[in-house]
Image: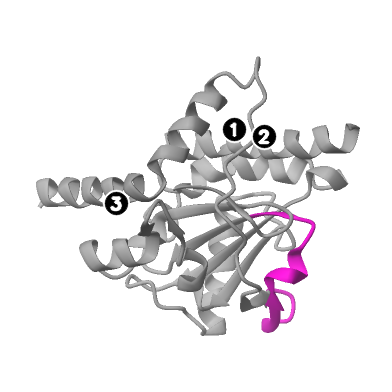
Amino acid sequence: MENKAKKGKLKVLIAFLLVFGPALTLVFISTRGCKHNFKELEDFGKLPNLSFSVYSPENKSFSNKTLKDFQGDILFVSTIQTSCPSKCQISLFNFRELIYNHVYENKRKKMKQVRIISFITDKDGNAVKDPAAFAIMTEILKDNIPNYDPTLWTLATGDVKAFYNIDNNGKNLLKSSEQEYGKGAYQKYLLLLDKNAHLRMVLPANKEGEIRVMFEDLALLQKEYDKKRSE
């Protein structure tokens, strides 16, 4: 069973690299030397104005939103699986320590504004719509993240697969993952969108190393905006 699991993870990684490998290699090299040279992140294209619903813990209800409602914010998009919320699709501990705490500490700086949208899914990647499941997930986030702020880290439901229907390098991230490795394989990917909903980076969200690199990519994107503002 362990060998099968390792082979499955390796296959997903290979598919991921086929779609984004060339650009990621360049970005990885640039982030290693970001203290000395400034390199802008690759632009994988603008996402459509996707619609979804966000959960309000205060009212225990949903409201309809689109990506355009978040224009002007840097966005992270992820999934959280109900049956394994803290480590399967996203490592809550590593995301909290490496990214969320930075977002929280800089939430009052307009140019640094970052938001997180996490879609609640089942093990197959299907959207969960039950308000009770969202109430439970909110408590899980509070337990794992002492300074959890639902205005910064929003839980959502909707057509999450539309966010991952990404074409690059002659491949499609969603289709390649699902055709070759089963339903829900895309769920472990963390998306980084700029302030105009352009996809700038994709990396797995369940490993410390990848989350650490994603933080460096966030820093590069923020530096890009700082540079433009000073010109």
Amino acid type for the residue under numbered disc 2: Ala
Residue 119 is situated, as x and y percent measured from the top left of the image, at 53, 69
Please rate how many residues cluster around mark 3, counting C-alpha atoms within 10 Å: few if below 14, some from 14 to 19, many from 20. Answer: some
Count residues near mark 2 (Cα–Cα under 10 Å), then give few for <14, some for 14-19, many for 20+. Answer: some
Q: Is residue 47 left or right of residue 65?
A: left
Relative to 80, say whether 136 is above or below.
Answer: below
Tell which circle, 3 or 1, labels the residue nearer the N-terminal end. 3
User: Badge 1 local density, few (<14 within 10 Å), some, or many (20+)?
Assistant: many
The span from disc 2 to disc 1 (Cα, nearest Å) is: 5 Å
Asked if the residue at tag 3 contacts the one at tag 2, i.e. Cβ–Cβ closer than 8 Å, the answer is no
Relative to 191, is 161 on the left or the right?
left
Mark 1: which amino acid?
Answer: Glu
Which disc number belongs to residue 219?
2
Are the residues tagged 2 and 1 within 8 Å (C-beta)?
yes
Secondary structure under badge 2?
A: helix
Query: What's the magenta region?
Result: 57-75
Image location (x, y in percent) of residue 231: 89, 32
- Provide the residue designation for mark 3: 15
